[in-house]
Amino acid sequence: MPPFVRLALGVRRLVDAERGGRFQIAPRLDDAVHRQLYLPDTNVLLSRFLSDSGVAEVSDFMPVEDAGVAHNVVRRAKAVRGEIRFDMRCDPRFDYARAQHTAEQRGDKEILFIGRSGERELALLLRSSVPMHLADGAAMAQFTLGAEESAWFILEVVRGEAPSPCARADYASDAFKETVNFWRGWIGRSTYKNRWREMVNRSALVLKLLTSRQHGSIVAAPTFGYPNISAACVTGTIATVGSATRLSLSTDSCGLATRKRPLHSCAG
């Protein structure tokens, strides 16, 4: 199974609120209005939280291979206006929550998760720019950001003992720029100029996300495991499956994003 699908299977609280895993970053803002959108011509998801006391943003993306490490998850929390307190919780599950896992603190800014199912093993390393701690097997952090300050978190599949590019201090910002440039360069080659250009481009970006770089094939069942409510709901799910399978990252208060509204609003 491709690494990005394995990552997605680790955080499926939308399917099972009690046993499913989660990777949540939530600002503490009273009566916040939530908005989600993709940065134009990219697969970078931006969640905004608007309140009288401040404005917060959470950016989610998976870097392309050209950015150094493919299939890891990069999340950035930012205070746009005001001083904002954030809570982060990363609590993955392995093998559809059937496998047990261990969590190990490696300094105050690294936590290693190892899931085992039979002879198989998958290790995920969470790095951050702010201190974290373990609580009941989950990585936790509480931090405060002033206006224009940001904090980042990187969840990656551990591959061998070689040093990871994700350990570089400037990795998150560099990966963001290279990933945005990749998607805009790729979709910029489209020759479609007609009425439904935005929708066609978004569909093409989703299909590109689901395509194996090694084999050229497309993931056959990207919405497997998500509730099948209605035809309209399924359409919404497929339209945003890039966010679902590649990221599975939406903050706990909003679920997976459709173009204009969160998926849970369709599922009730």
Image (cartoon, grey):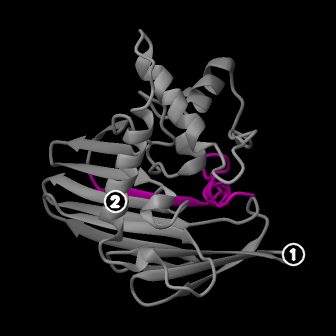
Magenta stretch: give its range: 1-29
The residue depicted at 74 percent of the width and 39 percent of the height is 221
- Residue 268: tell me if it is visible: no
Q: In 3D space, how far apart are the residues under numbered discs 1 and 2 (Cα atoms)? A: 35 Å
Taking 137 as reference, is 262 left or right?
Answer: left
Name the image quarter holding the C terminus. Answer: top right
Label 2 sits on what residue type? Arg
Residue located beneath label 1 in the image? 118
Residue located beneath label 2 in the image? 76
Task: Estimate how packed mark 1 is, as few (under 14), some (14 to 19) or many (20 or more) residues with alpha carbons within 10 Å.
Answer: few
- Residue 142: tell me if it is visible: yes
Position in image of residue 87 (x %, y %): 36, 64
Q: Secondary structure at mark 2?
A: strand
Position in image of residue 179 (x %, y %): 40, 52
Label 1 sits on what residue type? Gly
Q: Earlier in the sequence, mark 1 or mark 2?
A: 2
